[in-house]
Image (cartoon, helix red, strand yellow):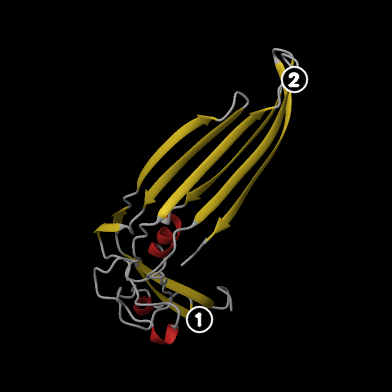
């Protein structure tokens, strides 16, 4: 199919609603430093994060579902149900250390390291859903349709929460918060008063990364 032949292989007519939402995110952090010996220093801390689901202030809110483990039993939750439950257990410990091996003045060797848990946010997938799923958007898809498109087929479809849907994003009602473990180790060699060389290793491990 081609425009020259007067036939379009695929055409999508869309209608979008105006939506406004905001995320409330809170965090509390405490840290302390302990000089274990003259050469060994520990720094440790604990952070607590709270990231409730978004609040919609304008336009229809994204629809929540009852479950996603069994698609045949999945149903729309009552209007006003949050997209997912709030996780109150997002604690993130942090630990760092520095050890000075000593040596001739101006030529100290220091080993440093640290690790910490960091909780992520869920903004991006929700933004993607707002651009392609009811009640934020409705699509009508036509295949092998005559071109120019007949006026009757140019009318955008009505946005509705009544199945079937062309596209629908479903969020796990018990969605785990994405988390990242970050760590680093470094060794430094001082070369006089103004210079030093070092080598470092930095890494991270992601858990519970998700897309709706």
Q: Residue at x 45, y 60 (%)?
A: 125
Q: Is residue 42 left or right of residue 202?
A: left
Give the labeled residue for mark 2: 103
Q: Please tell me whether residue 191 is drawn above or below residue 3 in the rendered image.
A: above
Q: Which of the pair 30/210 is nearer the observer?
A: 30
Question: Which of the 4 image quarters holds residue 101?
Answer: top right
Q: Please tell me whether residue 116 is drawn above or below residue 14 in the rendered image.
A: above
Mark 1 Cα-neighbour bin, 10 Å: few <14, some 14–19, many ≥20: few
- Label 2 SS: loop
- Percent across and percent down for residue 170 are 41, 72
- Label 1 SS: strand
Q: Please tell me whether residue 31 is drawn above or below residue 103 in the rendered image.
A: below
Residue 198: mark in rendering = none
Q: Which of the pair 159/81 is nearer the observer?
A: 81
Residue 143: mark in rendering = 1
Q: Please tell me whether residue 179 is drawn above or below residue 191 in the rendered image.
A: below
- Percent across and percent down for residue 87 are 37, 60
Looking at the image, is mark 2 or mark 1 earlier in the sequence? 2
Question: Which of the 4 image quarters holds residue 54?
Answer: bottom left
Mark 2 → mark 1, Cα distance in angstroms? 77 Å
Q: Residue at x 45, y 56 (%)?
A: 124
Q: Is residue 99 left or right of residue 46?
A: right
> Is there a contact, CB below 8 Å, between mark 2 and mark 1?
no
Q: Residue at x 43, y 75 (%)?
A: 167
The quadrant of the image that shows the N terminus is: bottom right
How many labels were placed on the picture? 2
Q: Is residue 200 left or right of residue 126?
A: right
């Amino acid at each position: 199919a081609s425009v020259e032949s007067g036939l379009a292989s695929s055409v999508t007519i869309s209608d979008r609603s105006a939506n406004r939402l905001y995320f409330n995110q809170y965090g509390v952090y405490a840290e302390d430093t302990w000089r274990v010996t003259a050469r060994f220093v520990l720094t440790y801390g604990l952070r607590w994060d709270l990231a409730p689901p978004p609040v919609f202030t304008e336009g229809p809110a994204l629809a929540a579902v009852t479950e996603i483990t069994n698609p045949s039993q999945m149903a729309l939750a009552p209007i006003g149900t949050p997209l997912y439950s709030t996780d109150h257990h997002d604690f993130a410990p942090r630990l760092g250390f520095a050890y000075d091996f000593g040596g001739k003045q101006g030529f100290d060797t220091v080993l440093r390291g640290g690790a910490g848990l960091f909780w992520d946010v869920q903004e991006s997938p929700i933004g993607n859903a707002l651009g392609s799923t009811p009640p934020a958007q409705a699509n009508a898809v036509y295949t092998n349709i005559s071109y120019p498109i007949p006026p009757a087929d140019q009318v955008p479809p009505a946005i509705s929460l009544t199945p079937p849907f062309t596209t629908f994003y479903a969020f796990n009602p018990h969605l785990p918060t994405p988390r990242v473990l970050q760590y680093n180790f470094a060794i430094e060699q001082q070369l006089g008063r103004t210079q030093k060389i070092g080598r470092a290793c930095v890494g991270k491990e992601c858990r519970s990364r998700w897309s709706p």
